[in-house]
Amino acid sequence: MAGNTSGFVFCVTTWGESHGAALGAVIDGCPAGLDLTEDDIQQALDRRKPSLGVASTSRGEKDKVEILSGVFEGKTTGTPISLFIRNADVQSSSYNALKDVFRPGHGDYLF
């Protein structure tokens, strides 16, 4: 499937770029009544934070997720869940040399 959406009954659409103001996702098809908090998602984000390794990024992004819709008082509502992560350390100039170069994403290697 082309684009930023995967799935049919349970759909996840991602948006944004690392050099943009923010990135996020919209998750559609999640039933109502499931337990879900920002902390649940934050734990997964924290696992991918930069390390002190040579190949790691020097950017110190906080990667703080906000749930904008689809969850009320820690329970899914059955409506699309919108997730938002602001990019606080945007340095678009770092991408100037690559702006016209095709750079496949992780998902492109699956097909």
Image (cartoon, rainbow, N blue to C red):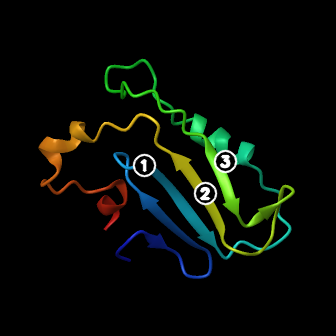
Residue 26 place in picture, x, y as percent: 57, 67
Residue 81 lies, with reference to residue 46, above or below; the image says below
Q: Residues within 10 Å of mark 1 (few under 14, many from 20)?
A: some
Which residue is identified by label 3?
A: 41
Which residue is identified by label 2?
A: 83
Quarter assignment of residue 29: bottom right
Residue 106 lies, with reference to residue 5, above or below; the image says above
Q: What's the residue type where badge 1 is placed?
A: Ala
Q: Which mark is nearer the camera, 1 or 3?
A: 1
Quarter of the image containing the C terminus? bottom left
Residue 7 place in picture, x, y as percent: 53, 76
* Residue 38: mark: none
Q: Residue at x 38, y 20 (%)?
A: 53
Q: Secondary structure at mark 2?
A: strand
Q: Residue at x 67, y 59 (%)?
A: 68
Residue 105 place in picture, x, y as percent: 31, 56
Q: Residue at x 62, y 75 (%)?
A: 10
Tag 3 near tag 2, CB within 8 Å: yes
Q: Secondary structure at mark 1?
A: loop
